[in-house]
Amino acid sequence: MPASWIVIGISVAYLAASLVVGMWPGRKASGTAAGFVAGDRSLGLIVMYFITGATIFSSFAFLGGPGWAYKKGAAAFYILGYGALGLVPFYFLGPRAARLGRQYGFISQAEMIAHRYGRRSIAGVMAVISVAAFIPYLALQIKGAGYVLFAVTRGEVPVWLGGALVYGVVMVYVLRSGVLGVGWTNTFQGVFMMALAWGLGLYLPYKLYGGVQPMFEQIAASQPEHLLAPGLTAAGDPWGWGPYSSAVLVSIIGFSVWPHLFMKAFTARDESTLRKTVVLYPTFQIFLVPLFLIGFAGVNFGSAPESADQILPHMLMNMQIPAVLVGLFCAGALAASMSSGDAMVHAAASIAVRDGGVRALGWKLDDATQRTWIRYAVVVVMIASYLLAVMYRGDLVSLLLWAYGPVGQFFPVVVATLYWKRATGAGVLAGLLGGGAVTVALTLYPAGMPWPLHAGIYGVIVNLVLLVSVSWLTAGSLTTQDSGYLDVAGTPS
Amino acid sequence: MTLRNALFGLYALCCLGAMTWPGYALFGNSIEPFVLGLPFSFVWVIGWVLATFAVMVIYHNTGDR
């Protein structure tokens, strides 16, 4: 039927356009690992802004955000709430990391930390935690892309095929261009996503209920609990303030130390660019508002999708909406998935090779060989995530929230490394291992928690206690390496 | 610690308290009044995001360079 051809045509044209934009800069980056991974430290404010924003806004925001607002109501506001402060620590950490990166040639977080203490095992532990957190995160993006194609073709393209098609494109441009390709593609996709989210977020309430306020008044009359924090659980029971507040807190803690985000400190042109990116970040956060409006528009829609994450495509497919608009949505949701997925696969592969292989296991690789190995790792990570995406049956947001637990363990370690003279390698290692173990244990056995908080909160507390106490116990005299390192971190360039 | 940093830290703590229990539950958690068509519980969170933007702009521009 012609309408579905228009939808597919627009999506394909969009994928082709992002491929062209993504491949272009491949000519300019140098052929070294630093060129491939850190873009020769040359990204300016506009690209940095969109790379940071678009990396974070993913299928999680575009499908999971409306899904939560639709199913769990005000619980979704936690995403907006943590975003207010989430990037603020990076205002302070980012420039310090950037100075160290310039001085010592770091291109990853783990490298930066392991170097100070001269312990390869720290890089290894961080690489394992990072890759383990990235694979499910990437799987969500692939699944999100599959959902979109599945919904807009009314099931003609199955989820496994849709995911494979879209991520085939992503793999091509990541392999070709490295991080510069990611940067320019994200700029292009970021602009597009913002326009689309606002368009749909205002159009759907207007079309279905005659406006935003009439929509909310209707929800307030029938299900007032939907609009009051802390919202509802997936089963429709009231959610608690403990889980809500700790979800906000653990996300703020973990946000700025996500390895792919933290690596941006090493790609920025200068410190002022980094700081301005943080300052401007809340303007990107406001883009969640229309996405929540879309989800709330689904509450009294009448029919329900198979899973809450599909509420947006479900509404579009069941309304009299021009095929062009559906096609644009499809492209926008794919952009959301791809612009996060590309940065993640790139980060996971670089971390596995540079931190895991070169640092921790002591592989001797020259720059060109490293670049080749990173490309192999891209393919491996992609396949692992794809398999998980095909097998996983749960909802999109929950797994990401879970991944914040382990990632949050990096926060105390990064802060101590960049600021605290007395921190020792043994302390850092104890914090990472202890905090990580507690987080994983309590995630698997939530009954062991004294209060119903996010497991990552308990992990961070244990992490801090171990980091501080073991550092005190093992502190010798301050080595010259430590003081030189902290001098570099504290001296503005 | 400078006054600028102290004020900034104080703001961050207030914002965190306002986004979670108890600030959100006490002050921000009601449907009425609607602001620009949005329920107050939603506007409350949006307002703090915008306030953080304003505070970051001020903090950034009052720094030594």
Image (spheres, helix red, strand yellow):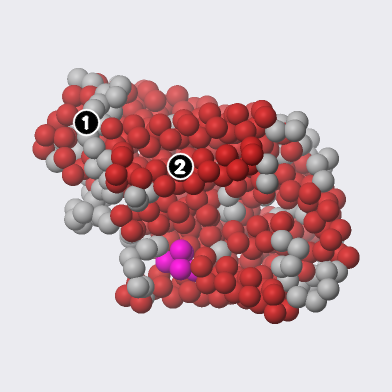
Q: At 59% across and 74% down in the image, what residue appears?
A: A466
Q: Is residue A358 above or below residue A300?
A: below
Image spot of residue A236 (x, y percent): 19, 53
Q: Position of residue A328 (x, y in %)?
A: 41, 27
| Residue nearest the observer in this picture, A10 or A200 | A200
At 39% across and 33% down in the image, what residue appears?
A: B46
Dividing the image into 4 quarters, which one contains the C terminus of chain A? Answer: top right
Residue A44 found in image quarter = top right
Spot occupied by residue A136 in the image (x, y as percentages of width and height): 47, 59
Residue drawn 55% across and 32% down? B55
Q: Can residue A46 be seen by looking at this rendering? A: yes
Label 1: chain letter = B
Query: Is A382 situated left or right of A439 in this image?
Result: right
Image quarter hosting the N terminus of chain A: top left
Residue B15: numbered disc: 2
- The disc numbered 2 marks a residue on which chain? B
The secondary element bearing badge 2 is classed as helix
Q: Residues within 10 Å of mark 2 (few under 14, many from 20)?
A: many
Q: Which residues are magenta?
A: A455-459
Residue A162 in the image, given as x and y percentages of width and height:
42, 46
Under tag 1, what secondary structure?
loop
- Find the residue positioned furthest to the bottom: A473
User: Main structural element of the magenta stretch: helix, strand or loop?
Assistant: helix
Q: Amino acid at mark 1?
A: Glu
Rendered image: mark on residue B32: 1
Tell me which label, 1 or 2, sits earlier in the chain.
Answer: 2
Q: Is residue A151 above or below residue A207?
A: below
